Image (tube, grey):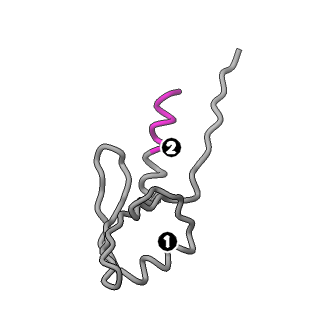
Amino acid sequence: MRKQLLVGLNMYGTIFDPTRRPLLGDEYIRLLEKYKPSLDWDVESEESFWGYEDEDTNEEGEVWYPTLYSIKYDSFELRELN
């Protein structure tokens, strides 16, 4: 009997501002344009993220969004399961 694994890829990120909520691509692009961040890399989760502080409201937030590298890493991990 052949075993199969169904895999889904997130097509959204996560923003913590201060609550956690999903972040879709169009909002992600607007945030990138507004804050012009440099991306950090979390070694443990193999995911990119960046933080920001809104100068108008003094609120801080953190944005996590999949990158091509993190998707490639996840697919590599799945192949290792085979």
Q: Nearer the viewer, residue 9 or 21?
A: 21
Residue 81 in the image, given as x and y percentages of width and height:
49, 28
- Could you tell me which secondary element the residue under label 1 belongs to? helix
Q: Which mark is residue 80?
A: none
- Could you tell me which secondary element the residue under label 2 belongs to? helix
Q: Nearer the viewer, residue 17 or 80?
A: 17
Left or right for 10, reference 68:
right
Residue 31 in the image, given as x and y percentages of width and height:
44, 77
Q: Is residue 74 depicted above or below 38 in this figure?
A: above
Left or right for 42, reference 14:
left
Provide the residue designation for mark 2: 75
Within the magenta stretch, is there residue 81? yes
Q: Residue at the location (58% across, 58% down)?
A: 11
Within the magenta stretch, is there residue 75? yes
Left or right for 21, reference 4:
left
Q: Which residues are magenta?
A: 74-82
Q: Give residue 25's quadrant in the image.
A: bottom right
- What is the C-alpha distance between the residues marked 2 and 1? 23 Å
Provide the residue designation for mark 1: 28
Q: Nearer the viewer, residue 38 or 14?
A: 14
Q: Residue at the location (51% across, 58% down)?
A: 21
Q: Categorize mark 1 by other alpha carbons within 10 Å: few (<14), some (14-19), many (20+).
A: some
Prevailing secondary structure class for the magenta stretch in the rendered image? helix
